[in-house]
Amino acid sequence: MIHDPASELLEHVDDEDRSIGPIPRGRAHKEGLWHRAVHVVVHNCHGRILLQKRAAAKDYPGMWDTSVGGHVGAGESYQEAALRECKEELGIHVREMDLGVVGKHLFDELPTDVEWVETFELEHEGPFHPDPAEVEQVRWFTADEVEALVTQGATTPHFALQWRRELASMARDLP
């Protein structure tokens, strides 16, 4: 059976992140309906940040992005989605207690993709087993190297915005 991401059910939410009900992902993006997403910023004990290069079949192919990112399914919590996405995208099993909350923000820079995004941080050394359908490769970067990627336009627009809003200061505080 072929999986159709557009038919995946997401939680439709309002401007205060209150649930309205389930909607198909395709409709959420086509009509610009608010929904939820998660990001997990993976770093190692040396303060390097793991970024993923998006696979050719994904939106923004070949661009660098958050370590882990994805939509929150209908009826799923942000934390449940973060744990699921870590397994799906990086092939790692993570426990709830391993995730630290970075913050939550509204991403509304693109008219067809309006989402509340909760960001978590995770210290993990690997190994990683990325799903090639989702991730072309993963690589460790210093905060300065990530800054250079953002400046060069080599990251997704959402990652660039999030880097400037909250991740750059978080990354500089890592060991």
Image (tube, rainbow, N blue to C red):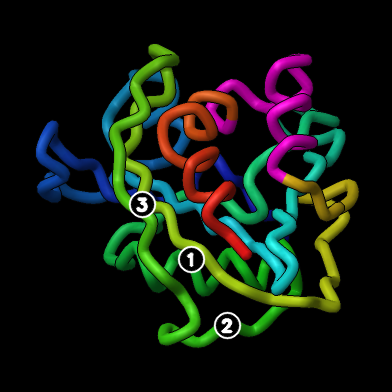
- Could you tell me how far apart the alpha carbons at marks 2 and 3 are, in whole angstroms? 17 Å
The residue shown at (44%, 15%) is 110
Q: Relative to residue 10, is residue 40 depicted above or below? A: below
Q: Quadrant of residue 60?
A: top right
For the stretch drawn in magenta, the main secondary structure is helix
Along the viewing direction, whichever of 21 and 156 lies nearer the viewer: 156
- x and y percentages locating residue 35 in the rendered image: 31, 40
- x and y percentages locating residue 22 in the rendered image: 26, 50
Q: Is residue 102 magenta?
A: no
- x and y percentages locating residue 41 in the rendered image: 58, 56
Secondary structure of the residue carrying numbered label 2 = loop
Query: Given contact means CB atoms under 8 Å apart, are the residues at marks 2 and 1 in contact?
Result: yes
Along the viewing direction, whichever of 1 and 21 lies nearer the viewer: 21
Mark earlier in primary sequence (1, 3): 1
The residue shown at (52%, 54%) is 173
Q: Which residues are magenta?
A: 143-159
The residue shown at (78%, 15%) is 152
Q: Relative to residue 43, is residue 29 depicted above or below? A: above
The residue shown at (78%, 29%) is 63
Q: Please name the residue that numbered disc 3 is placed on.
A: 118
Mark earlier in primary sequence (2, 1): 1
Q: Please name the residue that numbered disc 1 is placed on.
A: 82
Instruction: Please name the amino acid that badge 2 sits on.
Output: Val
Mark earlier in primary sequence (2, 3): 2
- Could you tell me how far apart the alpha carbons at marks 2 and 1 are, in whole angstroms? 9 Å
Q: Please name the residue that numbered disc 2 is placed on.
A: 94
Query: Given contact means CB atoms under 8 Å apart, are the residues at marks 1 and 3 in contact?
Result: yes
- x and y percentages locating residue 8 in the rendered image: 48, 50
Left or right: 136 with respect to 31? right
Left or right: 55 with respect to 18? right
Secondary structure of the residue carrying numbered label 3 = strand
- Could you tell me how far apart the alpha carbons at marks 1 and 3 are, in whole angstroms? 9 Å
